[in-house]
Structure formats: structure tokens, C-alpha cells
Image (tube, rainbow, N blue to C red):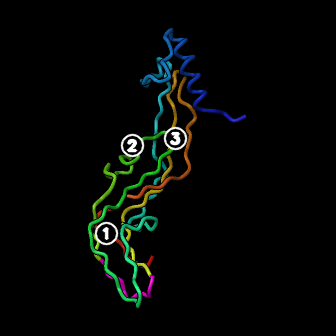
Amino acid sequence: MKFNTRAALAALTIVGALLAGTQPAAADAEIQCSPGAGVACPHYEIIDVKRTGGHVDKLKPIASCTVGSGGGACTITSCKTVTRTVGVRLGVDVGFVKSQLSISQADAELTSVSCTSPVLSTGQTWATWGMGNKFEYKVKRWYATPIGETIPEISTEHRAFDPDGTQTYCGVL
């Protein structure tokens, strides 16, 4: 039988409230974290952090150009936004993860792009990608309850990309 942490915490909250002589909070009411009143409090920690600088976010080209008939070169010149991404699990807030990794709370960075391809064949595409820091990490969550702390849950590995706004990488797509 699989253990359902959420159901167990909900039951613990109700039992704790009844033992304390109070009414359990309504399901749609905002619950304040208070272990003494029977409300389990989640706590989070970002662990096993690995940072790689100069990472090229190859999953998301920010601009591209394709060479037409006859071959030749193409140039990308513009201002583009590079998206900041943060993976989350176990109910942790994106802002909390960003603060723990010391990255900006903004969703993106504006960057200036200017690069020209070498001579390419007809139909080849020249692209540019944002560069920045790549983070790999895990989320650890535990609860403070009226009877003590629960055994921590640890997520699988997550990734975040923090563009620096000053660097781009250009190459054939």
C-alpha cells in the first residue's frame, strides 16, 4: 500500500485541531502555519546544488535566419529577451528557489544579439542562444507538526537557467 503524505498531513491537521479543542479550518480557507494548533508547516531547503557557468541554452534559440537559394551568409542583429527558467517540485515557491540560488527574481534578461554566419548552404539555419549559469539541484521538504518533524522528502534533480544578459552563442542550428 502506498503512503499518501498529503492525506496523512490533512488527517494529522484535523486530529490535532480536535485534540486542541478547535474546529479544523475549512478546505478553502487560508491555513496559517501553526504546529501547536495542529497545522503542519512545510519547510524547504535547496540541496546538492551544482552550478555551471558559460552554459549555452541550446533548447531555446532566441533568433535565427535561414539561407535562401544559392547559399551565402546571414546576419542576426537585434535585442531579444532570454528566459530565466526554474524547475520546482514538492510545492516549493519559484521565488524561494531563485533566492536560494542567488539569481534574479525577473523572468527574463534583455540581450543584444549581433552575429554573422560563415557561408552556408541553401536551407541551412544560423541561430543564436542565450548564455548564463545552469544550476542542478534537489528540493528537500519536511513538515513541523505538533509531534515533531516528519522524515524529509527529497525531489529528483531539477534545473534552472539564469541568463546573464551579456553573452550569446551563435552557430548552425
Q: Amino acid at mark 1?
A: Gln
Front residue of 129/47: it is 129
Dot 3 or dot 1: first in sequence order is: 3
SS label for mark 3: loop
The quadrant of the image that shows the C terminus is bottom left
For the point 37% across and 56% down, which residue is it? 84
For the point 49% across and 22% down, which residue is it? 39
The answer to whether 28 is drawn above or below residue 43 in the figure is above
Front residue of 14/111: it is 111
* Span of residues in magenta: 115-123
Q: Which residue is mark 2?
A: 96
Q: Main secondary structure of the magenta part?
A: loop
- Tell me the number on the disc at residue 167: 1
Toward the front, the furthest residue is: 69
- Tell me the number on the disc at residue 13: none
Q: Residues within 10 Å of mark 2 (few under 14, many from 20)?
A: some
Q: Is residue 142 magenta?
A: no
Q: Amino acid at mark 3?
A: Leu
Q: Which residue is mark 3?
A: 90
Q: Are marks 1 and 2 in contact (CB under 8 Å)?
A: no
Q: Amino acid at mark 2?
A: Phe
Whole-angstrom CA distance, mark 2 to mark 3, is 13 Å
Dot 2 or dot 3: first in sequence order is: 3
Residue 146, horizontal then vertical, whole percent:
52, 21
Whole-angstrom CA distance, mark 1 to mark 2, is 26 Å
